[in-house]
Amino acid sequence: MSVTFGNALVESAEHRDLRASVAALGKRYGRGYFTAAVKAGRPVDELWREAGRLGYLGVSIPEEYGGGGAGISELAIVLEELGATGAPLLLMVVSPAICGTVIARFGTPEQKRRWLPGLADGSLRMAFGITEPDAGSNSHRITTTARRDGTDWLLSGRKVFISGVDIADATLVVGRTEDARTGKLKPCLFIVERGAPGFEFRPVEMEIAAPEKQFQLFLDEVRLPAEALVGDEDAGLLQLFAGLNPERVMTAAFSLGLGRYALTVAVEYARTRQVWRTPIGAHQAIAHPLAEAHIALEMAALMTRKAAFLYDAGDDLAAGEAANMAKYAAAEAGARAVDQAVHTLGGNGLTAEYGLASLLTASRVGRIAPVSREMILNFVSHHTLGLPKSY
Ligand SMILES: Cc1cc2nc3c(=O)[nH]c(=O)nc-3n(C[C@H](O)[C@H](O)[C@H](O)COP(=O)(O)OP(=O)(O)OC[C@H]3O[C@@H](n4cnc5c(N)ncnc54)[C@H](O)[C@@H]3O)c2cc1C
């Protein structure tokens, strides 16, 4: 039996049907498929392609570009349900959720035609690069800069921890340009194709058991045509946030899926493992922390749905606050569920056979990326509670 979520009062019949069909796909591949790919150091292309073919990757992309015409609520359901079967697709957080959303909302007609149908059916993938070695959490400090050269742009800078660059056809890079009027730097988004001269990427050795790898990017005067700039040069910040809110909702969905998967394994084990007169799950020291983990996941799932709902309703401001809270709550709940699951299995929690220990590092990712738990607590302190800033 798996630990299930979703209830008629808070979720439509369509959403519950979507959950059920995605879960069925995830189970056909399952954790075994996922860990075999990790061991072999290869991407989970078969699952990616099939999810694309079935319309799951493109569920939030507009219908006129081959997508499902739904929203981030539906895309988050897809990622959460795949994760709950032990086979999450991390690149969904960036390819359809950030890049697909930003291009659909702000891209030129040509950019939409070039990228959206492929992002929708999974035949094209995009990575997303904002983090820089010397800026980290302080994205106001990024120095990747684009300057004009005739009608072209020349983009230079460095990025770090960028996921999936090796398997992405292009990376949506956050850079800055100089405002012609004020001389100040303002954020801008550029589509940089993987083979562009001057664009180099090197893997960062990570201790995460995941098929997607992270990379350092070196951009050395990468020449980009004028049409590589996404949307409006003067609306970079607005466009960026249009992508970052879905990213937070999707990271929440990733953590929820991981937590649910771990909890399912632990509950099954606690029901059957017996070393005294009763199964270990009858001992409250084992049962209560699992019950608490379940409650925390349920609460985080509700917050995630609220954030996705606000985003899909077009309320970017309210969605920003809710998406931060959802990402925080889900990451904490996911990490706690994994930790408790590992403990529930005793020694088996650390065996390769049960495969739970590798989730310990994976479940930490949601607490660090795309924005750390402390930066969310800062956001809520300042924006929601009106407390003064320390930095
Ligand atoms: C697996 C993985 C995948 C990633 N994928 C991508 C990707 O695809 N694209 C991308 O652009 N980035 C990606 N990232 C980068 C990620 O977004 C950053 O790691 C994250 O934003 C934190 O930045 P940092 O690592 O530089 O930490 P730092 O900014 O150096 O922070 C270190 C610690 O200090 C704390 N801290 C910093 N400032 C404050 C403050 N003012 N108050 C309180 N505490 C503070 C942080 O919370 C953190 O705990 C990924 C990271 C990981 C681990």
Image (cartoon, grey):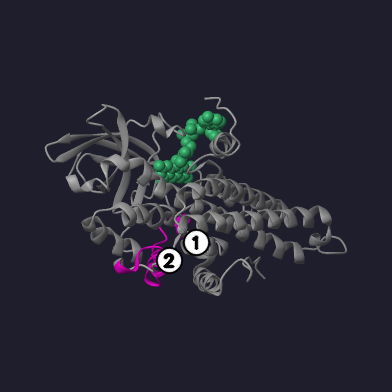
The residue that disc 1 covers is 73
Outermost residue, top side: 390
Residue 53 seen in the figure: yes
Q: Quadrant of residue 69?
A: bottom left
Question: Residue at label 2?
Answer: 70
Above or below residue 81? Residue 336 is above
Residue 277 position within the rendered picture, expressed as x and y whole percent measured from the top left: 88, 64
Looking at numbered disc 2 in the image, what kind of residue is underneath it? Ala
Pick out the residue farthest to the left.
Answer: 150
Q: Does the magenta portion include 54?
A: yes
Residue 377 position, x and y percent, is 58, 37
Residue at image position (33%, 30%) is 143
Look at the numbered discs 2 and 1 and tell me whether their residues touch, using CB distance below 8 Å.
yes
User: What segment carries the magenta color?
Assistant: 35-64
Q: Amino acid at mark 1?
A: Ser
In the image, taking residue 146 as reference, residue 339 lies left or right, namely right
Tell me residue 107's x, y (percent): 28, 53
> Which sits in the foreground, 17 or 234?
234
Asked whether, in this view, residue 107 is left or right of residue 302, the answer is left
Number of marks: 2
User: Could you say which quadrant of the image residue 297 lies in?
Assistant: bottom right
Residue at 36% x, 41% y is: 237
Tell me if 17 is positioned left or right of 144 in this view.
Answer: right
The answer for how far apart the CA atoms under marks 2 and 1 are is 8 Å
